[in-house]
Each structure stands twice: as C-alpha cells, then as structure tokens.
Image (cartoon, rainbow, N blue to C red):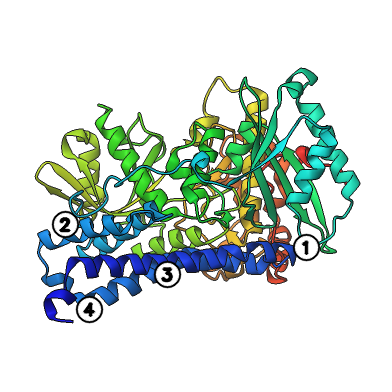
Amino acid sequence: MNSASKHSPIQVAYAILKGFDKSFRLYCNITAEAKQRFEKAQWQACQAASKKRIDLYEQSLTETVTGIYEGYLPQKQSLSFWKKVKSEFIFLLEGHKQFELAETFFNSVIGRVFKHQLIDDDVMFVRSSRCHLTAQAIPDFINTFEAQTSLKHTIENILAAYAFRIPFENYNRDLKNVMTEIKRKINVKTRLEITSVDLMKPTFYRGKAAYIIGRMRKSSGDIPFVIVFLVNDEGELYVDTLLTERRDLSVLFGFARAYFMVDTLHPAAIVDFLQELLPNKKNFEMYTAIGLYKHGKTVFYRNFLEHLHNSTDQFEIAPGTKGLVMQVFHQPSNGIVFKIIRDEFGESKKITRQDVIDRYKLVKNHDRIGRMADTHEFANFRLPLARVSDALMTELNESCANSIEVVGDELIIKHLYIERKMTPLNLYLAREDLTHGEIHHAIDDLGNCIKHIAMANIFPGDMLQKNFGITRHGRVIFYDYDEICYMSERNFRELPKSDDPYALDTLSVAPNDVFPEQFEHFIIGKRDLKALFKKLHGDLFKPEYWRNIQRQVARGEIYHAAPYPVQQRFKR
C-alpha cells in the first residue's frame, strides 16, 4: 500500500467503522449475558457488568483514535480531508443496522481529533444522515398474542414464550395474580376492545428484575403491559407485579435509574416502540435508558439545537439556593439545567475540582437506584451569546471564568454537566398551596431517598434540602454529588454524653467521622417539618442504623428498589 492510499479518507472511515463494530459487538456480549446472570441470581455480577459496559465506550474510542493516529496521521490532514472521510463513512453505513450509533461513534472520534473544538455538520454528524427504521419496519421484532381466546390462555402463552431456565415459585398463583390485576384495572367493556397483546421480543434486565414490555392493542388507544419478574432466595422465579399505567412506565424509564440490559441489534426499533408508549418522553431519554447513553447525548444535543432555534427565551440563573461548588443555570422553556464547576469553592468545601469530576463519574457508573439524577457531560458546549442574560453572564464571569470563553458571538463552556430539571425540594416545601398530604409525602420520600442511596452503598454527604429535587411524579431525587463517598469510607459515631456543652469541641474527630444525631440540624429546617421527618425517619439520626447498612453492604447484599409503590406488588 502506498502512502497516498494508506492515508486515503476511505481507509480512515473504514477504521472508524471497524472500531465501532468491535465496540458494539463487545457491548452486545455483555448485554446478552444478562439473562444468565438473572437466572443465577448473580447480583454482584450484574453491577460489575453494568459498570464494564459503561466504561467500554471510552476504552473502544481510545483504542480506535490511537490506531488512527498511528496509521493515518490525522493531525496532518486538512479540513477537506475530514469532509471526505465523512462522505465515505456515510457510504459505508448503507444498510448498517446500527447506523445511528455508528454516527455517534464517528462524532466521538472527530471530537478527540479536534479536541472538541469543531462542531461542523460538514465534518461530523450534527444531524443524522438518514431516517431510522421504526419498530413496524423491523421484521420479527414483536411477539403478538391474540386476545380472542380466554384471558387465561393469553397469559399462559405469554409466560411460555418468555420462559426462564429456573422453576416458578408458584406458577398458578402468579398466573392468577396477573389475571386478577388485569380484571381489577381494566373493566369488561375495555377488555372486550383489546385485540392483541404486542410485546417486544427482547427482555429488559436491570438490577434484580426482568421485564417483558409491550402493550394491549385496542382501537381507542393502547394500554401499557409490563410483567415484572424477580428471583427469590431459593433461586425460584415469581411475578412481582403487572404495570398498565403510563405513569408507572414513565417512572420505570426514569432518569435516576441504572441503564437496562436489552439484547437487540435494533435499538432504534426499541426506542421507537417505547416512544409510542411514552410520547412525553424524549427520544434521547429512551436511548439513554437502554444503555446507549453516548447516543442519547448526541440526540439530546440535536434536540437542544432544535429547541434553541424554535424558542426566544434567554438562559438565566436557575431558581434555588446558590451552590458552593456548582453554578447552575437554565432556559425556562427547556426541561434541563446546566451545571458548571466553580473556579473556587466555599470555605466549608475541602475538595478539588478533580474530586467533583470523579464523584460525578462515580454516580454515572453506579446503580442510581432511582434516587440519583443521571447527567450528560459536555466539553466546549456553545451558546449564542445574545441568548445569555446579563445577570447570568456577570455571574459566570465572577464564578466560572476559567471554564468559559467568548469567541465571536458565542459563549463556549469548556466543561459542563446537563441534568433533567426538577423543583428544588426547599422551594417546593416553601409553597403555600401544598396540601397536608403533599407535604407528608415529600418529607417521607426525602427519608426514603436518603435510605435508598445508603443501601446502594453511597453516603450522600451534604443532605440539605436544597440538594434534593422533586419530580412531576412527586419522587424525591438527589442531585448534589460533591460530598458523596462509599459507605465504608465513613465512621458513624455517637455524640459524647456529657453535661459540658463544649464536650464535642474536645472530642477527637477524624476527617471521616460522622455524627448522625446532628443530621436533624440541617436536613430539615422548619420546626414542624423537622418533627414530621423525625417521626417518619427517626432511625436516620442513630449511628447504629448507618452501621447496620455498612454491615449489609460489606456482606455483599444488593438492595432492590422497586420502581413502583410497594402496594402494587403481588401478595405471595
């Protein structure tokens, strides 16, 4: 091969596609083993596989970019060369089953080569090169169960089609539970309208649960249909619940949960099917939920550009208490917030910028258990300068000058996190229109949130109300990660018992010592809310509660946080 052919655009395009194909093959290998891990109740292995799959993308990207640098000297190529590389790559994608994911991998390579300083549709895929295939266009993607026979026969056929290599704990009980739940939730008239149950062939795995997901078809509108399987301590299978409400399905695919394992060569069809069930969810959220978070980030950015084009409101400082580590802003018309690490932290924060980055990465790789918000991380994110409010620009110049740069008519943010927008809990509880029931639920769920995070082996650290948000479904989510650590990294101690008010000052306190009895002074401020919180979750103020969780984690116990209320679980 002569030098010209070796450095030809087609060779570079092929090297990138080869890198993607290898990466996706390894991704699929990890995902395909999810069923076996579920059947063998290998919950520790489930968590390890989830982390391994997340890390895989960056490893594959580094390997591909290194190969391109060694073989094709990209730093010596002109911009026109890279435009030709994209053209050749589009040609290679003809008929590719995961072309949209390959485009994202291509973008990642370009980002590395140009150090994230070039966002140009002539060189990368700011917009996709073609339309996606829908679920209907993919042959043999759906299992259809006709509903003309008896309800019992239909459910039996479904359970047989999605069989596991482990016995049922009590098959007849589970069959009856599913049938009873359908009859309870769906009246006779509506049931007679149902023509079939359409289920995606791949089973969805996450944590300790397996889900078969689909819909009951009827002319006046489809009804979600999700059967949830768990495994008992004896290794036997049982049906935990049946979900038929869009609200439940929305929570199941929420932004605060770990990514599903779904064994499929047609992720676009999965996303298309899910979007029909959840039209209010964004396309990027669905890709992210099934573990393709890098492509979810690509789709998010495309959605962001479209929203920016179709809106006129400015970017402003986000409502809520100002953080000591992060500067947070938003665009009121968009359901996301932007977070930039401040140049300097408040005196109480004994951490570095790298500590913050590492802790956000920890949460990305960890089981977020439905209680910690997922984030997308960006480098050199661009905003039109004219759309940035004067107050926000002043604040950014004062607090984040090292992370921003103005180039022409654009504000470039060198490092940025993006999260789903929630109402800060302190602002929510300050509302005067809340009912007693709404207040009780929020305070109770705050305690549940803290407990769930701890049982997932994370100590939240800074548990002020302002560091929690509440979703439109009323679920409390934690989103401030600068002081998190593993539970094993803290020593939970009792306060000294003494009549001396200054006894604590003379106590030997190590950096990792924590006194849970002091939590009541800052988790909840208002006296009446503090009393309610102590009544509902008084155990959080006792060191023994935290030490008990430490022991459970040390034994390797994996906590399963069901993504639906406990009262929806079937009786066993």
Of the two numbered discs 2 and 1 on the same chain, state the one appearing first in sequence.
Answer: 2
Of the two numbered discs 4 and 2 on the same chain, state the one appearing first in sequence.
Answer: 4
Disc tally is 4
Q: Which mark is residue 71?
A: 4
- Hey, what amino acid is under mark 1? Arg
Q: CA distance from mark 2 to mark 1?
A: 51 Å
- Label 2–label 1 contact, CB within 8 A: no
| Figure check: 197 above or below 7 | above
Of the two numbered discs 1 and 3 on the same chain, state the one appearing first in sequence.
Answer: 3
Q: Which mark is residue 165?
A: 1
Horizontal side, residue 217 vs residue 136: left or right: right
Point 82% across, 33% down: residue: 151
Report the residue marked by disc 3. 22
Q: Which mark is residue 83?
A: 2
Circle 4: element type = helix
Q: Residues within 10 Å of mark 4 (few under 14, many from 20)?
A: some
Circle 3: element type = helix
Percent from the top left, x then y, of residue 443?
63, 37
